[in-house]
Image (cartoon, rainbow, N blue to C red):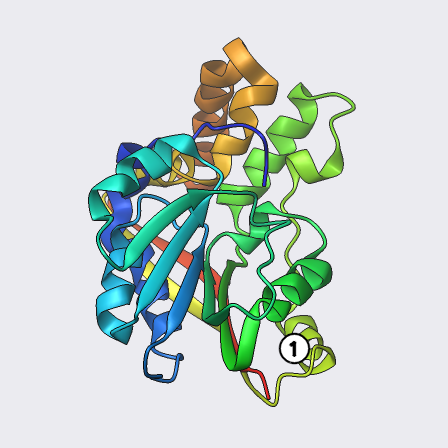
Amino acid sequence: MPSFDGWDPSQYNRYAAERELAYWDLAALIRARDSARVADLGCGDGRLTSGLARLLDADAVVGVDSSRAMLEAASRWSDDRVSFELADIGTWERPGHFDVVIANASLQWVPGHRAVLARWSNSLAPAGQLAVQVPANADHPSHQVAVELAGELLENAPEDQVAINVLAPERYAEILDELGFVDQHVRLQVYVHHLGSTSDVVEWMKGTSLTRFKEPLGERYEDFVAQYRERLLDRLGDRSPYTYHFKRILLWGRRP
């Protein structure tokens, strides 16, 4: 994952109720298994990780994240079966160790999705399950404006620093097949979020996608956000309330 730690748990959780809808839809794809060992990759502040432990009645759940700020917040959820560790989910691999590997809204932060999914798959025990949710909203103005503006301000910036690379749903289905999953479920789902105003989209993005620009922009970040707000409202209109449509890919597979 990126080396920066621009995450703010409080900002992220301003829309916790909306964000967690996809997490529980993803968790619903997981088939119950006795004494399960679970890895939650990109666990954030750990609240949902703790809830997943209860939902699956898992023996042990480890939440993995690269943000020290998020893991500090997650520490409150640690107990005899839930623990957390600092690691880069893009290189993370624990061969044959877990019954379930889940990654909710985190795969998009790392490049080389086939190689990453291969490492996560290799971390599964026989009959293990992989469950991944990936935001796929790059064609929405909320994301387009951010990429356009960052491209103007960050000359010669690496492409993966500006644009987040997400594959087509069918490509993820192909990858699961290539990796030997005997069962799979892949779907594109549109989530409808009723926000107070168009400006709330800016606050939503400040909690997630815009964080990747904090380190490269440095002192220019606040000016970037101000320009982003102005352009986005010009593109979408200053509306109250505002309906934010957000597409996400949910994929699940089971190993032999």
Viewer-side residue, 3 vs 37 = 37
Instruction: List x then y, in percent, for residue 193.
Output: 31, 57
Q: Is residue 30 above or below residue 215?
A: below
Q: Determine if residue 141 is in view.
A: yes
Which residue is painted at 62% across and 28% down in the image? Answer: 150
SS for callout 1: helix
Q: Residues within 10 Å of mark 1 (few under 14, many from 20)?
A: many
Q: Is residue 143 above or below residue 168?
A: above
Instruction: List x then y, in percent, for residue 20.
Output: 30, 58
Q: Is residue 205 above or below residue 195?
A: above
Please identify the quadrant where the N terminus is shown.
top right
Kind of residue at badge 1: Leu
Residue that carries the numbered disc 1 in the rendered image: 176
Q: Is residue 174 above or below residue 110?
A: below
Which residue is painted at 29% across and 56% down in the image? Answer: 82
Which residue is painted at 29% across and 65% down in the image? Answer: 52
Instruction: List x then y, in percent, for residue 62.
Output: 38, 56
Q: Is residue 126 left or right of residue 76?
A: right
Viewer-side residue, 120 vs 191 = 120
**The quarter of the displayed image where residue 35 is located:** bottom left
Viewer-side residue, 68 vs 16 = 68
**The quarter of the displayed image where residue 236 is located:** top left
Instruction: List x then y, in percent, for residue 248.
Output: 48, 63
